[in-house]
Image (spheres, rainbow, N blue to C red):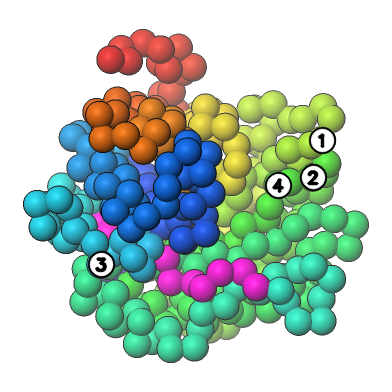
Amino acid sequence: MTSLEDTARALVAEGKGILAADESDGTIKKRFDSIGAESTEGNRRAYRELLFATDGAEDYISGVILFDETIRQSAEDGTPFPKLLESKGIIPGIKVDKGAKPLALSEDETITEGLDGLRDRLNEYRELGARFAKWRATYSIAADKPSEYCVWTNAHALARYAALCQEAGLVPIVEPEVLQDGTHTLEESSKATGRVLQAVYTELHDQRLDYRGTLLKPNMVLSGYDATDRAGVQEVAEATLECFYKHVPAAVPGIVFLSGGQSDEDATAHLNAMNALGPHPWELSFSYGRALQAPALKAWGGKPENVEAAQRAYYHRAKMNGAARTGMYAPEMETAGVA
Ligand code: 13P
């Protein structure tokens, strides 16, 4: 087993998953606006420290994805965040894309940028303690979307990023996110997700990736958030599995889903239902941002006196998702034993 494979497998260790805490400046400002907190460097640092220092979270959290600012910040006592995480056995990772930008000559589609200078940035991040990286591409579902143009240009960029990561000794998390906004059906979501995955694995293969040292971070197959008659938990689990069985090679150690705007409890229930239908060729885990952080962010509200309440909320969600890793989650656990 290569060290890349070791890291990838450690990130999807039994009962554990990843915290995505890599919100860009714009996104974290939106999150802070929602709780009436100001997005200053100090507040962002304090909020991230609260999450990273939560006692016991390491029982359910294998890795944390950091943002460029965050990987350079330290805890109040001066310990750099990557060191703080490592001391708890949590693997530090880093978002390296520069965001989804308008795709030239397309109708409102996006291409993710950030390849220029990436080799040097990866080497610097590795020095700073990162062991894995993330790059997110986004696609919308509509009558003529995602276009083949958008699907293949993003797949090509994802593979170029992933190859540079493996060269630098970092595990690439490959994140093609088919956005689930809109009124589409479950079948339409499955079709779009399947097309995207097919292109991604074609490009990863052509660009010589060793799948064993990669992780996939996809959307789940859902009915659109504004669709009438939305699919239930079991249907979502079955449709998602069917799509991934068709398109994701068994050599990939793990699929770490994003939450993508689902409620925190829906994201947990869906993951749980998929694992209850296992075993599968790959580990099925989580790499949630909002679905792990939403209750903690709300409990914190930007106030130092709420840090403990926020840590309890974060710990609880981590524990619920840890249970969903083995299909052992039940909604009754949401209220049982909450301090
Ligand atoms: P969400 O779980 O909030 O979708 O965030 C995950 C992520 O990292 C998006 O890139």
N-terminal-most mark, 4 or 3 = 3
Marks 2/3 in contact by CB < 8 Å: the verdict is no
109 lies left or right of 312: right
* Residue at x 38% of width, y 63% of height: 67
Marks 2/4 in contact by CB < 8 Å: the verdict is yes
Q: Amino acid at mark 1?
A: Ala
Residue 54 is inside the magenta segment: no
Q: Which residue is mark 3?
A: 72
Q: Which residue is mark 2?
A: 182
Snapshot quadrant of residue 94: bottom left
Magenta residues: mostly which secondary structure? Answer: strand
Snapshot quadrant of residue 37: top left
Q: Which of the numbered marks, if any, corresponds to residue 325?
A: none
Q: Nearer the viewer, mark 1 or mark 3?
A: 3
Q: Quadrant of the C terminus?
A: top left
Q: Quadrant of the N terminus?
A: bottom left
Q: Which of the numbered marks, if any, corresponds to residue 227?
A: 1
